[in-house]
Image (cartoon, rainbow, N blue to C red):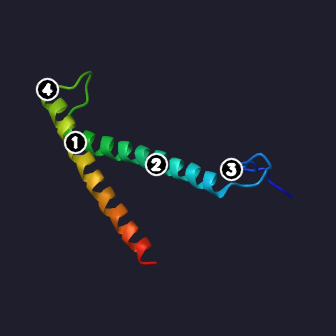
Amino acid sequence: MESGFGSDFGAGGGGKLDPGLIMEQVKVQIAVANAQELLQRMTDKCFRKCIGKPGGALDNSEQKCIAMCMDRYMDAWNTVSRAYNSRLQRERANM
């Protein structure tokens, strides 16, 4: 009995699964999930750090704090991502 869940996921014209297409779809889903996680964590961290009393608008110091916090968070995220990807590539080369 087939559940039908993802029954044509990555299927080509003949109904056969295309591993390359599946891998690309998984990579896209992972990239989207990573972007969502980045935005959520950055928003949470910078809001807690920069916003003392939530109100109808951000004052000038809060705007500057948010901008700087987000820039630093993105720089750190990119540095960690590059290091992680570099390590993965080295480990794959050693296999």
Residue depth check, mark 2 versus mark 4: number of the one nearer the observer: 2
For residue 79, above or below residue 72: below
Q: Distance of mark 1 from mark 3, alpha carbons?
A: 38 Å
Q: Does the residue at mark 4 contact the one at mark 1 (Cβ under 8 Å)?
A: no
Which label sits on residue 60? 4
For residue 39, above or below residue 56: below
Residue depth check, mark 4 versus mark 1: number of the one nearer the observer: 1
Left or right, residue 55 beside residue 37: left
Task: Give the amino acid type for the residue marked by disc 1 in the picture.
Answer: Asp
Q: Secondary structure at mark 2?
A: helix
Left or right, residue 22 beside residue 31: right
For residue 58, above or below residue 7: above
Other-residue count near label 1 (Cα within 10 Å), few / some / many at <14 / 14–19 / ≥20: few
Residue depth check, mark 1 versus mark 2: number of the one nearer the observer: 2
Q: Horizontal and vertical percent for residue 78?
A: 29, 52
Other-residue count near label 4 (Cα within 10 Å), few / some / many at <14 / 14–19 / ≥20: few
Which residue bears the numbered disc 1? 71
